[in-house]
Image (cartoon, helix red, strand yellow):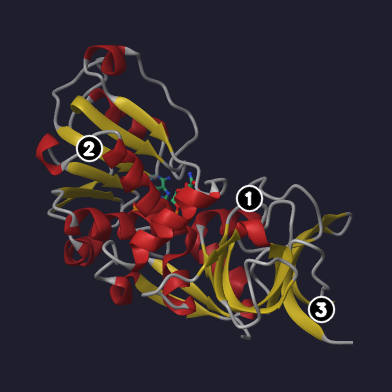
Amino acid sequence: MTTYPALRIHNDDRGYRAQIESLPLPEPQAGEVLIQASYSSINYKDALAGTGRGKILRQFPLTGGIDAAGTVVRSRDARFREGDSVIATGYGLSFDHDGGYAHYLCAPADWLVPMPLGLDARRAMILGTAGFTAALALHRLQVNGQHPELGPLLVTGASGGVGSIAIDLASQQGYEVVAVSGKAALTDWLKGLGAAQVLGRDELPGGERPLEKATWGGAIDNVGGAMLARITRTLVPTGGIAAIGLAGGAELVTTVMPFILRGVSLLGINASDTPGPLRHEVWQRLASDWQPRHLDEILTDTVSLAELPDAFERLLEGRTHGRTLVTLGG
Ligand SMILES: NC(=O)c1ccc[n+]([C@@H]2O[C@H](COP(=O)([O-])OP(=O)(O)OC[C@H]3O[C@@H](n4cnc5c(N)ncnc54)[C@H](OP(=O)(O)O)[C@@H]3O)[C@@H](O)[C@H]2O)c1
Protein backbone atom coordinates (compact mmCIF):
# COMPACT_ATOMS: atom_id res chain seq x y z
CA MET A 1 0.00 0.00 0.00
CA THR A 2 1.28 3.49 -0.83
CA THR A 3 1.78 5.68 2.21
CA TYR A 4 2.78 9.30 2.73
CA PRO A 5 4.07 11.41 5.65
CA ALA A 6 1.81 13.91 7.43
CA LEU A 7 1.99 16.09 10.55
CA ARG A 8 -0.80 14.59 12.67
CA ILE A 9 -2.26 16.49 15.61
CA HIS A 10 -3.63 14.38 18.47
CA ASN A 11 -5.48 15.34 21.63
CA ASP A 12 -6.20 12.29 23.80
CA ASP A 13 -5.29 10.74 27.14
CA ARG A 14 -1.60 10.94 26.11
CA GLY A 15 -1.96 14.73 25.77
CA TYR A 16 -1.90 17.28 22.96
CA ARG A 17 0.86 16.57 20.41
CA ALA A 18 1.85 16.98 16.76
CA GLN A 19 4.03 14.30 15.17
CA ILE A 20 4.98 12.96 11.74
CA GLU A 21 3.09 9.78 10.84
CA SER A 22 2.74 7.60 7.78
CA LEU A 23 -0.78 7.47 6.34
CA PRO A 24 -2.34 5.31 3.60
CA LEU A 25 -3.02 7.20 0.37
CA PRO A 26 -6.71 8.22 0.39
CA GLU A 27 -9.09 7.38 -2.44
CA PRO A 28 -11.00 10.52 -3.57
CA GLN A 29 -14.78 10.24 -3.30
CA ALA A 30 -17.23 11.81 -5.80
CA GLY A 31 -16.62 15.57 -5.88
CA GLU A 32 -13.13 15.24 -4.37
CA VAL A 33 -9.63 15.69 -5.74
CA LEU A 34 -6.36 14.06 -4.67
CA ILE A 35 -3.43 16.48 -4.77
CA GLN A 36 0.28 15.79 -4.51
CA ALA A 37 1.32 18.77 -2.43
CA SER A 38 4.58 20.63 -3.12
CA TYR A 39 4.40 23.49 -0.60
CA SER A 40 2.48 24.72 2.40
CA SER A 41 3.14 27.62 4.77
CA ILE A 42 2.86 28.65 8.41
CA ASN A 43 0.09 30.99 9.52
CA TYR A 44 -0.66 32.16 13.06
CA LYS A 45 -3.60 29.73 13.19
CA ASP A 46 -1.32 26.82 12.20
CA ALA A 47 0.98 27.59 15.12
CA LEU A 48 -1.99 27.74 17.53
CA ALA A 49 -3.32 24.43 16.16
CA GLY A 50 0.06 22.70 16.14
CA THR A 51 0.90 23.61 19.73
CA GLY A 52 -2.61 23.40 21.20
CA ARG A 53 -2.39 27.01 22.37
CA GLY A 54 -5.59 27.84 20.47
CA LYS A 55 -8.76 25.82 20.06
CA ILE A 56 -8.62 25.45 16.28
CA LEU A 57 -9.27 21.78 15.46
CA ARG A 58 -12.79 20.45 15.83
CA GLN A 59 -11.80 16.78 15.73
CA PHE A 60 -8.75 14.61 16.45
CA PRO A 61 -6.52 13.30 15.10
CA LEU A 62 -6.21 15.53 12.03
CA THR A 63 -3.41 16.57 9.69
CA GLY A 64 -2.49 20.22 10.39
CA GLY A 65 -1.98 23.04 7.89
CA ILE A 66 -4.56 25.47 6.49
CA ASP A 67 -2.63 25.91 3.21
CA ALA A 68 -1.33 23.70 0.40
CA ALA A 69 -0.44 23.99 -3.27
CA GLY A 70 0.39 21.17 -5.64
CA THR A 71 -0.68 19.04 -8.57
CA VAL A 72 -3.85 17.02 -9.08
CA VAL A 73 -3.06 13.28 -9.28
CA ARG A 74 -6.68 12.03 -9.28
CA SER A 75 -9.91 13.88 -9.77
CA ARG A 76 -13.50 12.86 -9.25
CA ASP A 77 -14.81 16.28 -10.23
CA ALA A 78 -15.23 17.51 -13.81
CA ARG A 79 -13.56 20.88 -13.08
CA PHE A 80 -10.11 19.37 -12.38
CA ARG A 81 -7.88 16.98 -14.29
CA GLU A 82 -4.68 15.07 -13.55
CA GLY A 83 -1.72 17.46 -13.84
CA ASP A 84 -3.66 20.64 -12.95
CA SER A 85 -1.86 22.95 -10.54
CA VAL A 86 -4.11 24.06 -7.64
CA ILE A 87 -4.22 26.11 -4.43
CA ALA A 88 -6.13 25.03 -1.32
CA THR A 89 -6.52 27.42 1.64
CA GLY A 90 -8.91 27.62 4.56
CA TYR A 91 -12.40 26.09 4.55
CA GLY A 92 -12.23 22.89 6.61
CA LEU A 93 -8.46 22.33 6.29
CA SER A 94 -6.98 21.69 9.74
CA PHE A 95 -10.42 22.40 11.25
CA ASP A 96 -12.59 19.34 10.62
CA HIS A 97 -10.72 17.92 7.61
CA ASP A 98 -7.09 16.84 7.07
CA GLY A 99 -4.92 19.82 6.13
CA GLY A 100 -1.89 20.69 4.04
CA TYR A 101 1.03 19.48 6.22
CA ALA A 102 1.35 16.26 4.21
CA HIS A 103 2.69 15.02 0.90
CA TYR A 104 -0.89 14.35 -0.27
CA LEU A 105 -4.17 16.12 0.35
CA CYS A 106 -7.64 14.86 -0.58
CA ALA A 107 -10.12 17.76 -0.61
CA PRO A 108 -13.52 18.73 -2.02
CA ALA A 109 -13.10 20.32 -5.46
CA ASP A 110 -15.23 23.27 -4.27
CA TRP A 111 -12.36 24.29 -1.98
CA LEU A 112 -9.75 24.47 -4.76
CA VAL A 113 -8.56 27.42 -6.81
CA PRO A 114 -6.90 26.64 -10.17
CA MET A 115 -3.38 28.10 -10.11
CA PRO A 116 -3.74 31.48 -11.82
CA LEU A 117 -1.37 32.37 -14.65
CA GLY A 118 1.48 34.37 -13.09
CA LEU A 119 1.77 32.23 -9.94
CA ASP A 120 3.31 28.84 -9.20
CA ALA A 121 2.95 26.57 -6.17
CA ARG A 122 5.96 28.05 -4.40
CA ARG A 123 4.97 31.71 -4.81
CA ALA A 124 1.34 30.85 -4.01
CA MET A 125 2.46 29.38 -0.69
CA ILE A 126 4.81 32.25 0.16
CA LEU A 127 1.55 34.20 -0.03
CA GLY A 128 -0.69 31.47 1.45
CA THR A 129 -3.61 32.38 3.67
CA ALA A 130 -1.65 35.41 4.95
CA GLY A 131 -1.27 36.91 1.47
CA PHE A 132 -4.82 36.05 0.49
CA THR A 133 -6.08 37.71 3.69
CA ALA A 134 -4.04 40.88 3.13
CA ALA A 135 -5.41 41.17 -0.43
CA LEU A 136 -8.97 40.38 0.71
CA ALA A 137 -8.73 43.11 3.36
CA LEU A 138 -7.52 45.69 0.87
CA HIS A 139 -10.20 44.64 -1.59
CA ARG A 140 -12.95 44.99 1.05
CA LEU A 141 -11.63 48.40 2.12
CA GLN A 142 -11.62 49.63 -1.47
CA VAL A 143 -15.12 48.32 -2.19
CA ASN A 144 -16.10 50.31 0.92
CA GLY A 145 -14.66 53.51 -0.58
CA GLN A 146 -11.12 53.55 0.83
CA HIS A 147 -8.67 55.52 -1.34
CA PRO A 148 -5.20 56.96 -0.76
CA GLU A 149 -6.46 60.58 -0.54
CA LEU A 150 -8.40 59.76 2.66
CA GLY A 151 -5.09 59.68 4.53
CA PRO A 152 -2.40 57.27 5.78
CA LEU A 153 -3.26 53.58 6.04
CA LEU A 154 -2.18 51.92 9.30
CA VAL A 155 -0.99 48.31 9.18
CA THR A 156 -0.66 46.71 12.63
CA GLY A 157 1.19 43.48 13.42
CA ALA A 158 3.28 44.83 10.57
CA SER A 159 6.18 42.39 10.62
CA GLY A 160 3.91 39.31 10.51
CA GLY A 161 2.78 37.39 7.45
CA VAL A 162 -0.44 39.31 6.83
CA GLY A 163 1.12 42.63 7.86
CA SER A 164 4.19 42.45 5.65
CA ILE A 165 2.20 41.48 2.55
CA ALA A 166 -0.42 44.17 3.31
CA ILE A 167 2.36 46.79 3.40
CA ASP A 168 3.67 45.62 0.03
CA LEU A 169 0.21 45.57 -1.61
CA ALA A 170 -1.08 48.85 -0.18
CA SER A 171 2.09 50.85 -0.84
CA GLN A 172 2.19 49.78 -4.48
CA GLN A 173 -1.40 51.00 -4.82
CA GLY A 174 -0.47 54.47 -3.70
CA TYR A 175 -1.36 54.37 0.01
CA GLU A 176 0.94 56.09 2.49
CA VAL A 177 1.44 53.08 4.76
CA VAL A 178 2.23 53.58 8.44
CA ALA A 179 3.42 50.28 9.92
CA VAL A 180 2.91 49.54 13.62
CA SER A 181 5.39 46.99 14.92
CA GLY A 182 6.80 45.74 18.20
CA LYS A 183 10.11 44.99 16.44
CA ALA A 184 12.10 48.23 16.19
CA ALA A 185 15.03 46.30 14.72
CA LEU A 186 12.92 45.61 11.61
CA THR A 187 12.26 49.28 10.78
CA ASP A 188 14.48 49.24 7.67
CA TRP A 189 12.97 45.92 6.50
CA LEU A 190 9.43 47.34 6.86
CA LYS A 191 10.42 50.51 4.99
CA GLY A 192 11.97 48.32 2.28
CA LEU A 193 8.56 46.64 1.81
CA GLY A 194 6.91 50.03 1.31
CA ALA A 195 6.13 51.53 4.74
CA ALA A 196 6.52 55.32 4.74
CA GLN A 197 6.80 55.37 8.53
CA VAL A 198 7.16 52.81 11.31
CA LEU A 199 5.65 53.32 14.79
CA GLY A 200 6.21 51.25 17.93
CA ARG A 201 3.14 49.53 19.42
CA ASP A 202 2.91 52.20 22.16
CA GLU A 203 3.52 55.14 19.82
CA LEU A 204 0.02 55.30 18.32
CA PRO A 205 -1.33 58.80 19.02
CA GLY A 206 -4.63 59.41 20.82
CA GLY A 207 -6.03 58.88 24.28
CA GLU A 208 -9.11 57.22 25.69
CA ARG A 209 -11.83 59.75 24.71
CA PRO A 210 -14.57 58.34 22.45
CA LEU A 211 -13.26 60.53 19.62
CA GLU A 212 -9.61 61.57 19.36
CA LYS A 213 -7.86 63.61 16.65
CA ALA A 214 -8.80 62.15 13.24
CA THR A 215 -5.40 60.95 11.99
CA TRP A 216 -5.65 57.81 9.85
CA GLY A 217 -7.42 57.28 6.56
CA GLY A 218 -7.91 53.60 7.29
CA ALA A 219 -6.35 50.53 8.85
CA ILE A 220 -5.56 46.87 8.32
CA ASP A 221 -5.51 45.49 11.85
CA ASN A 222 -3.97 42.14 12.77
CA VAL A 223 -3.81 42.83 16.50
CA GLY A 224 -7.31 43.53 17.89
CA GLY A 225 -7.78 44.44 21.58
CA ALA A 226 -6.70 47.88 22.82
CA MET A 227 -4.88 48.63 19.54
CA LEU A 228 -8.06 48.19 17.48
CA ALA A 229 -10.08 50.24 19.99
CA ARG A 230 -7.58 53.11 19.69
CA ILE A 231 -7.74 52.98 15.91
CA THR A 232 -11.55 53.31 15.93
CA ARG A 233 -11.14 56.60 17.85
CA THR A 234 -8.54 58.11 15.50
CA LEU A 235 -9.89 57.45 11.98
CA VAL A 236 -10.94 60.25 9.64
CA PRO A 237 -14.61 60.46 8.61
CA THR A 238 -15.68 57.59 6.29
CA GLY A 239 -12.40 55.71 6.88
CA GLY A 240 -12.48 51.92 7.10
CA ILE A 241 -10.82 49.35 9.33
CA ALA A 242 -10.32 45.77 8.16
CA ALA A 243 -10.40 43.71 11.38
CA ILE A 244 -8.32 40.60 10.71
CA GLY A 245 -6.60 39.35 13.80
CA LEU A 246 -6.31 38.98 17.52
CA ALA A 247 -2.54 38.71 18.03
CA GLY A 248 -2.90 41.31 20.83
CA GLY A 249 -6.32 40.31 22.16
CA ALA A 250 -9.84 39.28 21.19
CA GLU A 251 -11.64 42.02 23.15
CA LEU A 252 -12.91 45.23 21.58
CA VAL A 253 -13.89 47.99 24.00
CA THR A 254 -14.91 51.20 22.25
CA THR A 255 -18.02 53.36 21.77
CA VAL A 256 -20.40 53.86 18.86
CA MET A 257 -19.19 57.48 18.44
CA PRO A 258 -16.66 56.84 15.62
CA PHE A 259 -19.33 54.91 13.72
CA ILE A 260 -22.24 57.32 14.12
CA LEU A 261 -20.37 60.65 14.12
CA ARG A 262 -17.56 59.93 11.66
CA GLY A 263 -19.14 57.19 9.55
CA VAL A 264 -16.19 54.91 10.27
CA SER A 265 -16.62 51.32 9.01
CA LEU A 266 -15.41 48.21 10.80
CA LEU A 267 -15.09 45.48 8.18
CA GLY A 268 -14.74 41.90 9.36
CA ILE A 269 -12.39 39.70 7.36
CA ASN A 270 -12.89 35.93 7.26
CA ALA A 271 -10.44 34.39 4.81
CA SER A 272 -11.25 30.72 5.45
CA ASP A 273 -14.89 30.88 4.42
CA THR A 274 -14.55 33.35 1.54
CA PRO A 275 -16.93 32.09 -1.16
CA GLY A 276 -15.54 30.69 -4.42
CA PRO A 277 -16.10 33.62 -6.82
CA LEU A 278 -14.50 36.25 -4.53
CA ARG A 279 -11.72 33.80 -3.59
CA HIS A 280 -10.89 33.25 -7.29
CA GLU A 281 -11.01 37.00 -7.99
CA VAL A 282 -8.60 37.84 -5.14
CA TRP A 283 -6.10 35.08 -6.15
CA GLN A 284 -6.35 36.30 -9.74
CA ARG A 285 -5.39 39.80 -8.63
CA LEU A 286 -2.48 38.48 -6.54
CA ALA A 287 -1.21 36.79 -9.71
CA SER A 288 -1.60 39.85 -11.93
CA ASP A 289 -2.01 43.55 -11.14
CA TRP A 290 -1.59 43.05 -7.37
CA GLN A 291 1.56 40.87 -7.48
CA PRO A 292 3.62 41.77 -4.39
CA ARG A 293 6.97 43.31 -5.32
CA HIS A 294 8.92 42.06 -2.32
CA LEU A 295 8.05 38.36 -1.92
CA ASP A 296 11.74 37.40 -1.86
CA GLU A 297 12.33 39.65 1.17
CA ILE A 298 9.03 38.58 2.81
CA LEU A 299 10.09 34.90 2.63
CA THR A 300 12.36 34.67 5.67
CA ASP A 301 12.41 30.93 6.42
CA THR A 302 11.84 27.56 4.75
CA VAL A 303 11.18 24.43 6.81
CA SER A 304 10.42 20.74 6.31
CA LEU A 305 7.51 18.84 7.91
CA ALA A 306 9.82 17.64 10.70
CA GLU A 307 10.88 21.20 11.51
CA LEU A 308 7.30 22.49 11.93
CA PRO A 309 6.91 22.07 15.73
CA ASP A 310 10.00 24.23 16.42
CA ALA A 311 8.85 26.78 13.83
CA PHE A 312 5.42 27.05 15.56
CA GLU A 313 7.17 27.87 18.85
CA ARG A 314 9.35 30.53 17.20
CA LEU A 315 6.28 32.20 15.66
CA LEU A 316 4.26 32.26 18.89
CA GLU A 317 7.26 33.58 20.84
CA GLY A 318 7.49 36.52 18.41
CA ARG A 319 10.86 35.37 17.03
CA THR A 320 9.76 35.30 13.38
CA HIS A 321 8.83 37.88 10.80
CA GLY A 322 7.52 37.69 7.26
CA ARG A 323 6.51 34.29 5.90
CA THR A 324 7.70 30.72 6.46
CA LEU A 325 7.40 28.33 3.52
CA VAL A 326 6.97 24.58 4.13
CA THR A 327 8.49 22.21 1.58
CA LEU A 328 6.57 18.99 0.92
CA GLY A 329 7.17 16.02 -1.33
CA GLY A 330 5.56 16.96 -4.66
N1 LIG B 1 -9.54 36.90 9.78
C1 LIG B 1 -8.88 36.06 9.00
O1 LIG B 1 -9.41 35.48 8.07
C2 LIG B 1 -7.42 35.83 9.28
C3 LIG B 1 -6.58 35.29 8.31
C4 LIG B 1 -5.20 35.19 8.57
C5 LIG B 1 -4.72 35.60 9.81
N2 LIG B 1 -5.58 36.07 10.74
C6 LIG B 1 -5.11 36.57 12.04
O2 LIG B 1 -4.30 37.71 11.77
C7 LIG B 1 -3.25 37.81 12.73
C8 LIG B 1 -1.91 37.82 12.00
O3 LIG B 1 -1.69 36.56 11.37
P1 LIG B 1 -0.25 36.23 10.75
O4 LIG B 1 -0.36 34.91 10.09
O5 LIG B 1 0.26 37.41 10.01
O6 LIG B 1 0.59 36.04 12.10
P2 LIG B 1 2.14 36.38 12.39
O7 LIG B 1 2.94 36.19 11.16
O8 LIG B 1 2.50 35.67 13.62
O9 LIG B 1 2.06 37.94 12.70
C9 LIG B 1 1.43 38.45 13.83
C10 LIG B 1 2.10 39.76 14.20
O10 LIG B 1 1.31 40.40 15.20
C11 LIG B 1 2.17 41.14 16.06
N3 LIG B 1 1.92 40.70 17.44
C12 LIG B 1 2.17 39.46 17.96
N4 LIG B 1 1.83 39.42 19.25
C13 LIG B 1 1.36 40.66 19.56
C14 LIG B 1 0.86 41.26 20.74
N5 LIG B 1 0.76 40.58 21.88
N6 LIG B 1 0.46 42.55 20.68
C15 LIG B 1 0.53 43.25 19.54
N7 LIG B 1 1.02 42.74 18.38
C16 LIG B 1 1.41 41.46 18.40
C17 LIG B 1 3.60 40.86 15.63
O11 LIG B 1 3.97 41.92 14.74
P3 LIG B 1 4.95 43.11 15.22
O12 LIG B 1 6.03 42.48 16.05
O13 LIG B 1 5.46 43.69 13.94
O14 LIG B 1 4.12 44.05 16.02
C18 LIG B 1 3.48 39.59 14.82
O15 LIG B 1 4.48 39.49 13.85
C19 LIG B 1 -3.44 36.61 13.67
O16 LIG B 1 -4.20 37.01 14.78
C20 LIG B 1 -4.24 35.62 12.83
O17 LIG B 1 -4.99 34.73 13.61
C21 LIG B 1 -6.91 36.19 10.51
User: Picture quarter containing residue 258?
Assistant: top left
> What's under tag 2, amino acid-wise?
Gln
Find out whether the residues at labels 2 and 3 contact each other: C-beta distance under 8 Å.
no
Is residue 186 found left or right of 62 in the rendered image? left
Q: Residue 308's x, y, as percent?
A: 60, 72
| Residue located beneath label 1 in the image | 53
Is residue 10 found left or right of 303 in the rendered image? right
User: Picture quarter containing residue 167?
Assistant: bottom left
Find out whether the residues at labels 1 and 3 contact each other: C-beta distance under 8 Å.
no
Tell which tag, 1 or 2, sits nearer the viewer. Answer: 2
> What's under tag 3, amino acid-wise?
Leu
Quadrant of the frame with the N terminus: bottom right
Q: Secondary structure at mark 1?
A: loop
Q: In terms of depth relative to the viewer, which is nearer, 305 or 172? A: 172
Is residue 206 found left or right of 284 in the rendered image? left
**Is residue 148 something one can see in this rendering?**
yes
Q: Tell me what residue is drawn at x 31 percent, y 34 percent.
A: 241
Q: Residue 123's x, y, as percent?
A: 41, 75
Q: Tell me what residue is drawn at x 42 percent, y 66 percent.
A: 127
The numbered dot on residue 25 is 3
Quadrant of the frame with the C terminus: bottom right
**Compared to 17, does 138 lie above or below?**
above
Separation of residues labelled 1 and 2 (CA atoms): 35 Å
Count residues near mark 1 (Cα–Cα under 10 Å), then give few for <14, some for 14-19, many for 20+. Answer: few
| Residue located beneath label 2 in the image | 146
Q: In terms of depth relative to the viewer, which is nearer, 253 or 81? A: 81
Farthest residue, direction left: 149
